Amino acid sequence: MIPVIVIRPEPGNAATVAAARTLGLDAQPFPLFDMAPAQWTAPDPEPYRALLVGSANVFRLGGEGLARLRGLPVHAVGAATAEAGRAAGFTVASIGEGGLQPMVSALPPGRYLRLAGEKRVPLAMPESVEVDDVVVYAAAGLPMPPALIHMLAKPAVVLLHSGEAAAHFAAESDRIGVARGQIALACLASRIGSMAGLGWQHIEIAETRTDQAVLALAVQMCEKVSPRGH
């Protein structure tokens, strides 16, 4: 069976691996990021209409500063982020599909506060929308462990949940000499596939930005990844 490599950080890694195995996939956990809180001070919430949040890690790692902002509604990038926000005591005003940019483009006029990681997607703002960014967590890429290097010597499907993960995986693959032609990538969004670069056996994009859609894609891809990398 073609292995399915999951490199997203915890706790998402374990959840994805468990879901993948229920689908019969040979899912292998290799988190390639160390997530940590950043030092930050919550600004005065008064000037802001709402919060923009592009990752559940904001609520997992934001710490005590989040308490000052709980009166602001949250525009969440997806269902998992919205769920984490509610669990942290926030009210979710909207749940986006297709990333933060479409959600930002549809915002009512006003000033918004974006809580984000150190590495974040640049956004094009409508003329009537102002967004201030505050970094509340950081993700440090980790080197590939020997067990993963060994596994990537043969055909595999790699799940990519973020552009940063795609870029880091590509750089690590080049560093250790992975043969891109025998590795297939299942990506959460088209931007992620672009950041992985060229030369992979397949790059395919999930129909929706959900873990379930990426896993459904992986099931299909495992059936057509060539065992010889052709």
Image: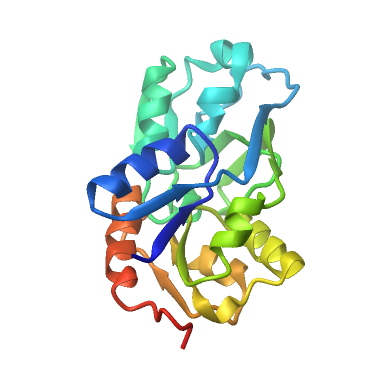
* Residue toward you, 61 or 40: 61
* Residue toward you, 219 or 188: 219
Is any atom of residue 124 visible in this view? no
17 above or below 220? above
Q: Is residue 134 left or right of residue 31?
A: right
Query: Residue 191 appears at what percent x and percent y?
Result: 53, 65
Query: Residue 151 appears at what percent x and percent y?
Result: 54, 61
Q: Quadrant of the N terminus?
A: bottom left
Kindly identify the residue that appears in the image at 57 percent across and 71 percent down: 194
* Residue toward you, 157 or 42: 157
Kindly identify the residue that appears in the image at 67 percent across and 18 percent down: 42
90 above or below 115? above
Q: In this view, which residue lies farthest toward the bottom? A: 230
Is any atom of residue 161 visible in this view? yes
Kindly identify the residue that appears in the image at 66 percent across and 36 percent down: 34
Query: Residue 222 appears at what percent x and percent y?
Result: 33, 69
91 above or below 138? above
Query: Residue 74 appears at what percent x and percent y?
Result: 44, 30
Q: Is residue 109 left or right of residue 114?
A: left
